[in-house]
Amino acid sequence: MAGRLLDIDPELAYQHTQAAVRRGGRIDVVREAAGIAAYRTGRFAEALSELRTVRRLNGSSEHLAIMADAERGLGRPERAIALAATPEADTLDPYSKVELAIVVSGARSDLGEHDAALVALDKLPTLKGDLGLRVLQARAAALEAAGRTDEAAALLADVDPEDLERAAGNAEPEEEVVVYDVYDEEADVEDEAGDLADDSDEDDSDSAAEGDLEDEDEDEDEDLDESDDAPDDEDDFDDDEDDFDEESDDEDADGPAVPGDGDEESPS
């Protein structure tokens, strides 16, 4: 949030960083944001303190140019020059080295060392883009500080003022496009109600299907029971046939005997 606000409302960005420091004061990126926001709002002593803390936390000197310029802001240009002469300055990336050279040039001009101010910029390679425009502005400022105003004006005569403003960071930021997601609460509620009704219908259908399956299972069980009872009826029928055969045998045993050939006839 603070990073997005720096170009729009630096003071509000600073307030955000202070809130973050109160919650995460031991985090290097939090202190870094606080230092940059303090620098952008002219709180140079606070910016120095915060960026020194960052250097202790992560060992990085990437903000050496800002620290040197903060020394200038506090009226101590000699300290800015001293920072640029430390071994840490040799570890900077090319971009940061250019920024530091611009600060040293301004510090030399503050001390009245105008030739040295121009020499500090002469050591830089030819640059293009916004960084090249910043070097051009620094050279023009050094010439003007030395009383060579005509040369300074001629140096910037062919440069678009808007490009200079953008390179210096003074241009108004482009309007941010904000996309709003319109949320229709009533439609959402209706959709949820419809989903619930669909789920209820599905549950009813599932219940009815389960009931039909249970009825079919019961019918099958009854059929199986009837099948189990059928052999018992057959056994009863077999028993009845056996009883009938036994009765027939008994009747044959009790019937009149047929006289044989050896039997004598009774006298008449």
Image (cartoon, grey):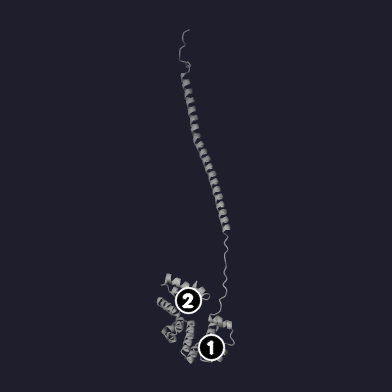
Percent across and percent down for residue 145 are 51, 89
Q: Tell me which amino acid carries mark 1.
A: Ala
Q: How many marks?
A: 2
Which residue occupies the extreme left position in the image?
A: 56
**Which numbered circle lies on residue 267?**
none
Distance between the alpha carbons at the discs numbered 1 and 2: 27 Å
Q: Tell me which amino acid carries mark 2.
A: Ala
**Which numbered circle lies on residue 140?**
1
Q: Residue at x 41, y 84 (%)?
A: 87
Disc 2: which residue = 37
| Residue 218 in sight from this viewpoint | yes
Mark 1 touching mark 2, by CB under 8 A? no
Left/right of residue 223 with respect to residue 50 in the rendered view: right
**Placement of 256 over or under 127, stated as above or below:** above
Which residue occupies the extreme top position in the image?
A: 268
Q: Residue at x 50, y 32 (%)?
A: 233
Percent across and percent down for residue 240 are 49, 27
Element type where label 2 sits in the image: helix
- Tell which circle, 1 or 2, labels the residue nearer the N-terminal end: 2
Within 10 angstroms of label 2, few (less than 14), some, or many (20 or more) residues?
many
**Placement of 19 over or under 243, stated as above or below:** below
Within 10 angstroms of label 1, few (less than 14), some, or many (20 or more) residues?
many
Element type where label 1 sits in the image: helix
Percent across and percent down for residue 116 are 47, 91
**Placement of 190 over or under 250, stated as above or below:** below
Q: Residue at x 48, y 30 (%)?
A: 236
Which of the two residues, 6 or 219, is positioned nearer the viewer here?
Answer: 6
| Residue 59 in sight from this viewpoint | no
Percent across and percent down for residue 200 are 55, 50
